[in-house]
Amino acid sequence: MALEVMSVMYISPDLKLTPSNTWRRRALCVLVYLSSSVTLWATPSAPSSERPPLMSSFSSGELSLTTGAILGLGLLTLKGDDWLGPRGASMGAPVEGSNDLRFSRWASPDFDPKAQWLGGAPDLLGYVAPALTLTYYVGGSALSGGVGVGGARPHEALAFSEGLSWAMFSTTLLKHLVGRKRPYIARGERGELDATAVNMSESEQLLSFPSGHATAIAATSFFLAADVSDALVSGPLRSSGAVSRALLGRVLPYASAAGLSWLVMYSRIKDQRHWLSDTLTGGLIGMTSALLSYHLHFDSYGEPYTQER
C-alpha cells in the first residue's frame, strides 16, 4: 500500500495542494496509476539466473529509511508550509550578470504567464514519467507473481522506490528549509515582466530551490538508463563487439536519460518557474539517488546482490 501512496504523493512539490488544484492533481495521479497497468503488454520472461530472496538484497536499515522518506514526503507535501515555512526567502535571487539571470532572460525574453512551453507537455512529463515507471515495476512484479513482466521484477521495484523516495524527500525538505523566489517573481520585481497573472500562492513563490520536476525526471530516467544498459550489455549485445556494447549498451541509454532530463529542466526555466541552478541541483539529487540505489543492489549484469557479498 505504501507504494501506491507514494505514486500519488511523491509528485513534485512545485505545485502545492491548494483548493484550486488538489482534485486535479489527485485525479491525474490516480488515473495514471490505474490506466498504465493495462500497458504492461510484454510477455513474461524468467530471470537469467536464480535470484536471491528479495529481503536478502535489502537491509532492514534501508527499508526503514525508505519508509521514513515516503512518510516524510507525504507529511511535507501536506504540512510543510505549516511546520517549516518558508516564511521568507533565505536564498537570494541571482544578481545582475549571473549565469542564472542571463540564462533565464535568454530562455524566456518575452514571458507569457498564461502559456507553457510545448503546451505544458514537458511539465506534465515530470509528473507522469515517475508514476508510470513506478507502476511498471510494481505492477509487472505483482501481475507475474514475482517472475517479472518485461524485466519488471520485485528487486527493481523496491530499488526504484528507494531511490525515488530518497530523492524527492531530500528535494522537498530543501525547498522548505531554503526558500527562494521563483524567476517570474524576481524578474517581475525588476520590472522585466508581469508576474501578476501567474496563479500561485505566496508560499509557492518561495519554493524555487531545488526543482522537484528536475529531481523526479532525473531519478526516473537515470534509474531506467542503468537498468536498460545492464540488460542490453548482458543480453542482446552480449556477443557484439566492444564498441557496439559501449555505444549502444552504455552511452545511448545514459545520453537518452540526460536528454530527457534536460527537456523537463529547460521547460521549467522557459516557463520561469526555476532558475538554471535550481534545475541542475534537482537533477543532480535525482540522478545521484537513483544511481546509488541501483548500483547498491545490482551487478553489471543487472542481477541483484545479496547482503553477504
Image: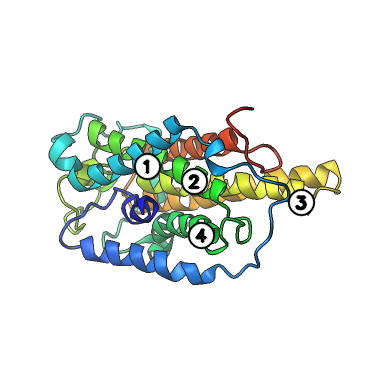
User: In the image shown, does 220 or 196 lie closer to the viewer?
Assistant: 220
Which residue is found at the position 61% from the left and 44% from the top? 226
Q: Quadrant of the image for the C terminus?
A: top right
Q: Residue at x 21, y 57 (%)?
A: 198
Residue where numbered disc 4 is placed: 142
Report crowding for label 2: few under 14, some 14 to 19, many 20 or more residues within 10 A (C-alpha).
many
| Coordinates of residue 164 in the picture (x, y in percent) | 44, 44
**Nearest to N terminus: mark 2 or mark 4:** 4
Label 3, label 1: how far apart the Cα atoms are: 32 Å
Q: Nearer the viewer, mark 3 or mark 1?
A: 3
Q: For mark 2, what is the residue?
A: 158
- Dot 1 or dot 4: first in sequence order is 4
Question: What's under tag 1, amino acid-wise?
Answer: Met
- Say which of 279 and 80 sits in front: 80
Give the CA separation, mark 4 to mark 3. Answer: 24 Å
At label 3, which amino acid type do we have? Answer: Gly
* Separation of residues labelled 1 and 2 (CA atoms): 15 Å
Find disc 1 in the rendering and name its residue: 168
Tell me the SS state at disc 4.
helix
Amino acid marked by disc 2 = Leu
Q: Earlier in the sequence, mark 3 or mark 1?
A: 1
Do the CB atoms of the residues marked 1 and 4 lie less than 8 Å apart?
Answer: no
Circle 4: is it few (<14), some (14-19), or many (20+) Cα within 10 Å?
A: some
Which residue was labeled with disc 3? 235
Q: Place residue 162 in its image quadrant.
A: top left
User: Depth check: 18 or 79 in front?
Assistant: 79
Please state, as top left, top right, bottom left or bottom right, where the N terminus lies in the image: bottom left
For the residues labelled 2 and 4, the Cα–Cα distance comes to 12 Å
Q: Where is residue 186 shown, x and y percent of the image? A: 23, 41
As helix, strand or loop, the secondary structure at mark 3 comes to loop
Q: Is tag 3's residue or tag 2's residue first in the polypeptide sequence?
A: 2
Tag 3 and tag 2, C-beta contact below 8 Å: no
